[in-house]
Amino acid sequence: MSRVYQNVLMDSTRWAGFAPRDGDIIIATSYKAGTTWMQGICAALVFQQPKPPLPQGELSPWLDSNFGSIEEVLALLEGLRHRRYIKTHMPLDGLPYFEQARYIFVGRDGLDVFMSLWNHWHNMTDEGFAMLNEGPNRVGPDFPHPPAEIGPAFDEWISKGGFPWEHDGWPFWSHLNHADTFWQVRERENVLHVHFQDLLDDLDGEMRRVSEFLSIPVDEAVWPELLRGVGFDAMKSNAEAMAPAAGRGLWKDTKNFFHKGTNRRWEGVLSEAQVAAYRALSARRLSPELDAWLARGSRATAYPNAG
């Protein structure tokens, strides 16, 4: 951990009191890249059933978020007796690194991330914005309501940093920097890279990769049921249990948290110039290998633990 990330949404210092266990699973994404999907996959593998026994917030909390007191989150984690799978949106340079844990990083093309983010942002209630902006431990400026027009919001997202060392991502954080921090450790045996597009293209194969990475044997007798349980439609139908902060008044429509589950919705919405500007930004900020993988997944390149 070399940086401190603190804003109205999250706080990297909340990891200071975390006590790791052998085999802990840390699901690490930026945002709108497949976090909840991977939580569902890990739940199916850990419990060997298509639906988790409790709402995900009670099984897999977002440790670095400012939604609840860190004392309550740590107590919840300490009380869990199953193999823990913990959600984080923190870049790796803001996370502690534990040799005994397994890290699953989920990547997605930034254009697809932004389109999902736009829906996510507009699905938040006034009460949700107040919950964030009036929180006792928040740091930095208020989290803003989304602007009316998508074009100017996208332009700002790719040109303004959420933290002093970032150059894009406002008002959240840099999706590109987040990916880069995990790409630097892609050859470590306890780090797995999974791509959103690969999950869409071959959910069975990718879930088997995750199962092998976590040393959880595949039981072919129940596998088809597990696979159906983590499909997009099944997770959307169980949104009250699967969506983060469900029941806390954060979302206008909890099911709409699982909006489309598709890629390339930016076509015909963002201009050709905006798409080109994002591609140029990604090419400047990332290595050619990561730039290609983040845009296209395993169809672009193959690296250890990266598809």
Image (cartoon, rainbow, N blue to C red):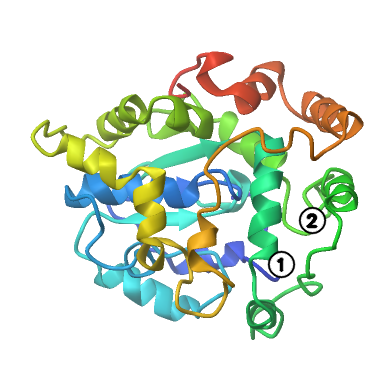
Q: Is residue 180 left or right of residue 282?
A: left
Residue 224: percent from left, percent from top: 19, 35
Looking at the picture, which amino acid does disc 2 mark?
Gly
- Picture residue at 32% right of the left edge, 24% below the top: 205
Looking at the picture, which amino acid does disc 1 mark?
Asn
Which residue is under mark 1?
7
Callout 1: SS: loop
In this view, 128 is above or below 219: below
Residue 61: percent from left, percent from top: 42, 65
Callout 2: SS: loop
Q: Residues within 10 Å of mark 2 (few under 14, many from 20)?
A: some
In this view, 117 is above or below 245: above
In this view, 88 is above or below 280: below
- Picture residue at 78% right of the left edge, 72% below the top: 140
- Picture residue at 55% right of the left edge, 38% below the top: 262
Q: Is residue 23 left or right of residue 106?
A: left
Does residue 216 appear in this view?
no
Q: Is residue 116 left or right of residue 141?
A: left
Q: Determine which of the numbered discs, if any, sits on residue 162 in the image.
A: 2
Quarter location, residue 299: top right
Viewer-side residue, 55 vs 8? 55
Quarter of the picture containing the C terminus is top left
Viewer-side residue, 179 vs 200? 200
